[in-house]
Image (cartoon, coloured by chain):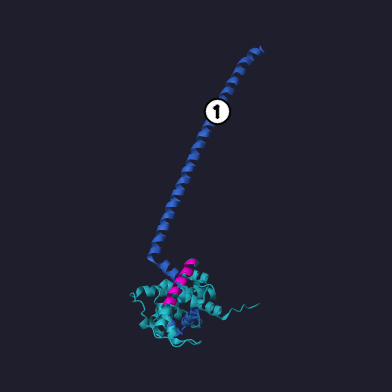
Chain colours: A cyan, B blue
Amino acid sequence: MTTVTLPQGEEALARSVRGDAAAFGDLVQEHQSMVFSIAYHFLHDRGRAEEVAQDVFLRLYRHLDSIKSGDHLVFWLRKVTCRRSIDEVRKLPKAPPTSLEDVAEPVAESPEVDPLLSRGLQRMVASLSEDARAVIILRYQEELELADIAEILDIPVNTVKSRLQRSLEILREKFHRWAGDVQR
Amino acid sequence: MIPFEEKLRNALRHEAAPEGFAERVLARTQREPEPGVKTWRQLKALVSGPAFRWALATAAVCLVIAAVLVHNQRQERLRQEGELARVQVRQALHIASVKLNVARKKVQEINREAPSSRL
């Protein structure tokens, strides 16, 4: 008799469905960074992002029997995190638009990642509308294709395309104004 | 010069989850029923609930009413069939009686004519 060996993630999923708490812990460890990052880039608040991420994993625990594969799990986590983050943003009182003075000044451009510049861009992303934020995060954090983003957000591909273009225009404009102010 | 989209990609890199995140999630799951057991428990809760008992009682009453109706219909059909058979037997007996009368008259006529022809 031959034994079918499942990939590590798939095996952890199969064991989790059977009620193995340690295997579920492995699943959380594997995907926590992705889930937390989506929530953090939405909310720009580590405390709230953790709350959202925990809720997402708790919801996963309750719906484990509906997850069909490792790929489905990743898709499900992205979808639920986006929805939960959008709900969380809508619960918050409307924040005033990000002023350029609130964003730290960028340092001289280097090929490595500039933490100040990244933080500034993160704040600019967090100032976009929830729908635009979702598209930008899924495109540039998760590196997803437009069709995949459309599937996760349950919207047509053309809507994703137009939202992405519009959001990039806004972000570019904000970024250039910010960089221009700093140079002056 | 780094293209803008690359800057965005760098800014939106994965962040590490806070220390002890997975442990806190697992602690919360301890208070939840086991995932596999959930469906069975839901089913058990549904079956033991008063709504289910009412539905079951209503279904039983409906079943008894349906059985009585079917039984009554069958009895009525049998009665009608019996009535029809009775009428048919009566008709058959009447026809047989008429035919016998005709035959009897013929025999009497033959008997009356027979002595004279013997002479």
Q: Chain of mark 1?
A: B
Relative to B61, does residue B29 appear above or below in the rendering? below
Question: Could you say where residue A128 lies in the image, as x and y percent from the top left?
Answer: 40, 74
Q: How many marks?
A: 1
Question: Could you say where residue A134 lies in the image, as x and y percent from the top left?
Answer: 44, 74
* Stretch in magenta: A158-173
Question: Could you say where residue B75 lies in the image, as x and y percent from the top left?
Answer: 47, 45
Q: Considering the image in quadrants, where does the C terminus of chain B appear?
A: top right
Relative to B79, does residue A93 appear above or below in the rendering? below
Q: What residue is at 54 percent from the left and 74 percent from the top? A: A71
Q: In terms of depth relative to the viewer, which is nearer, B112 or A141?
A: A141
Q: Secondary structure at mark 1?
A: helix
Q: In terms of depth relative to the viewer, which is nearer, B86 or B112?
A: B86
Q: What residue is at 41 percent from the left and 85 percent from the top? A: A183
The reply to whether residue B87 is in sight is yes
Give the residue pinned by disc 1: B95
Question: Could you say where residue B43 lies in the image, as x and y percent from the top left?
Answer: 45, 68
Disc 1 marks which amino acid? Ile
Q: Residues within 10 Å of mark 1 (few under 14, many from 20)?
A: few
